[in-house]
């Protein structure tokens, strides 16, 4: 063993608050998946989504913990701090969604035909999922950059975390668009879809460039200025989409401001249009907050000395 390289295993992966949070993620994720497959069960698109979210987050946590414990992340061409906080933030959002969707569609006050054991297991799954949300949120809180502290990465700042939330909200919008939203009826709604896709691509590009340590000058400008320019463009585009979409969906000339009484529950285009409208305003607010906060920070490249501060 090279005496200058230190031990092969990273003891901080276990004996630290961050390591404890990741161990809780693994334990709770394993418990959720085991209970769902054993007795609680799942069905339909909502159940498949919840199960996929739990399995994906569990696999991601296993990989992160293994690479951190063995120090193999040093061989990856990525910024480990940016990657882990991004994964934790995304997993938090996935767990929050699953913790709301699963009990909403599968937990009932009365015992189902399969008996009370099924209901009790589903309640236990919901509790463990909520605790898993707290475990992932604890990792984000432990990794988040604070004023005056050494910056570990752009994704650990509020602006970086907002990027993850913006991308997640965009995925919700895309899901609603794909669910009988009838967005292809008018040029205005098609424009909104283009805006959502373009802004999502820009946000994903910033995240990928940060994780892959491609934070040098972009288009003859510093990376932090490039991020601000992209955010300003996204704010303007989302502002226009937040106005155009409701006009072409709920104005009496193009649609209906009220939900049609004959519209089937769960298969109504009007419901999908409402979801898109609401989350368009949500993402506009997130991009606006991102733009305001980005004026208070300066991005520190991973190639600079580590004593740089926010």
Image: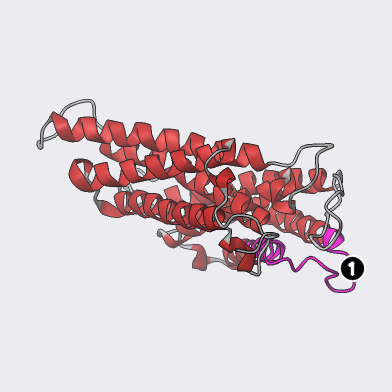
Q: Position of residue 4 (x, y in %)?
A: 70, 60
Residue that carries the numbered disc 1 in the rendered image: 221
Q: Quadrant of residue 220?
A: bottom right
Main SS of the magenta part reads helix
Whether the magenta-drawn stretch holds residue 219 is answered as yes
Q: Position of residue 48 (x, y in %)?
A: 31, 54
> Furthest residue to the top?
109
Q: Residues within 10 Å of mark 1 (few under 14, many from 20)?
A: few
Count the marks: 1
Q: Is residue 65 left or right of residue 129?
A: right
In-front residue for pair 62/182 = 62
Q: Is residue 145 left or right of residue 130?
A: right
- Can residue 277 be seen here? The reply is no
Q: Quadrant of the C terminus?
A: top right
- Can residue 215 be seen here? The reply is yes
In-front residue for pair 178/109 = 109
What colour scheme does the image use? Answer: secondary structure
Q: Secondary structure at mark 1?
A: loop
In-front residue for pair 116/68 = 68
Whether the magenta-drawn stretch holds residue 294 is answered as no
- Magenta extent: 199-226
Location of residue 108 with respect to 2 vertically, above or below: above
> Furthest residue to the bottom?
219
Q: Position of residue 144 (x, y in %)?
A: 69, 41
Q: Position of residue 84 (x, y in %)?
A: 60, 53
Identify which residue is drawn at 70% across, 47% down. Answer: 156
Q: Quadrant of the N terminus?
A: bottom right
């Amino acid at each position: 063993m090279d005496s200058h390289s230190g031990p092969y295993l990273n003891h901080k992966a276990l004996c630290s608050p961050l390591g404890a949070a990741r161990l809780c993620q693994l334990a709770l994720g394993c418990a959720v998946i085991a209970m769902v497959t054993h007795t609680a069960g799942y069905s339909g698109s909502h159940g498949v989504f919840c199960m996929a979210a739990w399995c994906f987050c569990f696999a991601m946590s296993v990989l992160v913990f293994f690479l951190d414990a063995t120090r193999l992340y040093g061989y990856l061409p990525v910024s480990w701090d940016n990657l882990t906080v991004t994964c934790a933030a995304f997993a938090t959002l996935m767990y929050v969604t699953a913790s709301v969707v699963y009990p909403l569609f599968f937990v009932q006050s009365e015992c189902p035909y399969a008996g009370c054991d099924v209901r009790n297991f589903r309640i236990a799954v919901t509790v463990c999922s909520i605790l898993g949300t707290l475990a992932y949120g604890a990792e984000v809180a432990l990794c988040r950059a604070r004023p005056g502290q050494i910056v570990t990465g752009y994704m650990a700042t509020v602006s970086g975390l907002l990027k993850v939330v913006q991308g997640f909200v965009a995925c919700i919008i895309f899901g609603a668009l794909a669910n009988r939203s009838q967005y292809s009826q008018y040029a205005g709604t098609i424009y909104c879809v283009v805006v959502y896709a373009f802004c999502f691509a820009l946000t994903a590009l910033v995240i990928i460039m940060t994780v892959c340590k491609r934070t040098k000058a972009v288009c003859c400008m510093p990376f932090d200025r490039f991020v601000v320019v992209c955010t300003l463009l996204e704010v303007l585009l989302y502002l226009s989409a937040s106005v155009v979409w409701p006009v072409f969906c709920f104005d009496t000339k193009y649609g209906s401001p009220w939900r049609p009484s004959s519209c089937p529950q769960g298969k109504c285009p009007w419901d999908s249009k409402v979801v898109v409208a609401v989350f368009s305003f949500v993402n506009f607010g997130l991009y606006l907050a991102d733009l305001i906060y980005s004026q208070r920070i300066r991005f520190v490249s991973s190639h600079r000395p580590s004593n740089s501060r926010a």
